[in-house]
Every structure is written in C-alpha cells, then in structure tokens.
Amino acid sequence: AQSVTQLDSQVPVFEEAPVELRCNYSSSVSVYLFWYVQYPNQGLQLLLKYLSGSTLVKGINGFEAEFNKSQTSFHLRKPSVHISDTAEYFCAVSQAGGTSYGKLTFGQGTILTVHP
Amino acid sequence: EAQVTQNPRYLITVTGKKLTVTCSQNMNHEYMSWYRQDPGLGLRQIYYSMNVEVTDKGDVPEGYKVSRKEKRNFPLILESPSPNQTSLYFCASSSQWGTQYFGPGTRLLVL
C-alpha cells in the first residue's frame, strides 16, 4: 500500500517571499510522484511530475520539486510567490511500473495563501 | 480543444435513487479515473481504467460502479446513493504517464 502525507494543511506567506510545501510518501516499491494545483472552484492542473532521472524537477509557473528517496520526500518550492499562486496544492504518488500504475493516491492538500 | 467533460455539474438527489455521472474525453487517452474530493481528505480515487473493458478499484470503491465500453467514455454509477456519498467528484484522463487532465467537477448532494 502507498500513502502520502502533506505536513502542512495551511501555509500563509507574503508576496515575493519564498515558499516550501512539504510532502512525504510511503511505499514498498518504486514510485512516481506528482504535484497538482487547484484554484478556487476549478479542477486540478498538473504542476510537475517525477518519473525517473534527475531528482530536481521543474514545473510550470516557476515551481520546482526535489525527489529525495532516502527521506521519502518530494517537497515543492518556489523562490518568489505571487498573489495568483493562492490555491490548494496536492501531492500524489503512484506505483512505478507493474499493473497498478493507474492507482493514484493523493495527500490531504495544502492551502497556500499569498498575502500582499 | 482538448478537454474532459462531466455531466451534470450539479446534482441534488434523494437516498436510494440511482444516478449516473457521465465523463467523456476527446484526447484518445487510454487511462481514465474517478475521484471524490472531501474537505480535509484530499482526493481519493474511486475507480480507474487503463483501457476499454479494463477497470480496477481505487481506494474508496464501495457504493460505486463504473464501465468502460468505449475509449472516450467512463460513466460513474451510484446504484443506491446514500448521504455519505455527498461530495465533489472529478473525472480525469491521460495517456500512460502523460499529464492527467481533470474535468470541471460534479457537485453531488444526497438527501
């Protein structure tokens, strides 16, 4: 079984400040990792994903995340946030390869609020 | 325009009255999935399908049925809805390990 824990349910931050949203996962097999963003009253949009290769992954809107296998973490970072980054962010994991790759498990979500 | 559509967008029903939420994608994706979103619980996968006639249970399949008779459609069926199925439902599709595209969501209230 796999699971995801997002360590902060809410993160308030000032505009132009850096931010880190933390995600830890648990799995007995190799994993694929994802970050999604949900703006108010909208569906989810993929920010970035780690499948293999470089552990530093760059995504859209200036976000990046680093896969740390030893710490089973996949934290999301942005060096300077904007008001428009206010949204809920979800970390997700799935099994790499095999027949269960379609089973995606999400974390509980982190609400990022950017203040002027 | 590449998109995932869901219907209806909003639905109020009563306990026990069978309902179907439709999901359709126009991107020829093999993979489709249903999630429910509840406050504080994030998104939980109900069922997923890796191709026509191939479906499997997610984390919370109880009380739901799905079918995948055509590649573009993946309806979610609630045979006998109960109040604990009141939630926001999302359908998604992708090619294998491509970007997952989410539908706009269906807000369901079961009285």
Image (cartoon, coloured by chain):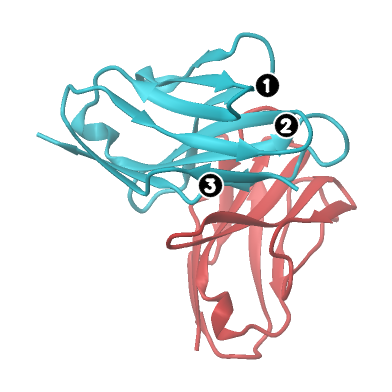
Chain label for disc 3: A
Q: Can residue B26 be seen in this snapshot?
A: no
Specify which label sits upstream in the sequence, 1 or 3.
1
| Mark 2 on the same chain as mark 3 | no
Q: Where does label 2 land, which residue? A: B95
- Residue A60 location, x and y as percent? 43, 21
Residue at 58%, 44% in the rendered image? A4
Q: Residue furthest front?
A: A70
Question: Which chain shows up in red?
Answer: B
Chain label for disc 2: B
Three-letter code, disc 1: Leu
The answer for how far apart the CA atoms under marks 1 and 3 are is 18 Å
Chain label for disc 1: A
Are the residues flagged by discs 2 and 3 in contact, CB closer than 8 Å? no
> Which mark is nearer the camera, 2 or 1?
1
- Residue A115 location, x and y as percent? 14, 37
Q: Residue A107 carries which label?
A: 3
Q: Can residue B20 be seen in this snapshot?
A: yes
Residue at 67%, 35% in the rendered image? B27
Q: Nearer the viewer, residue B45 or B99?
A: B45
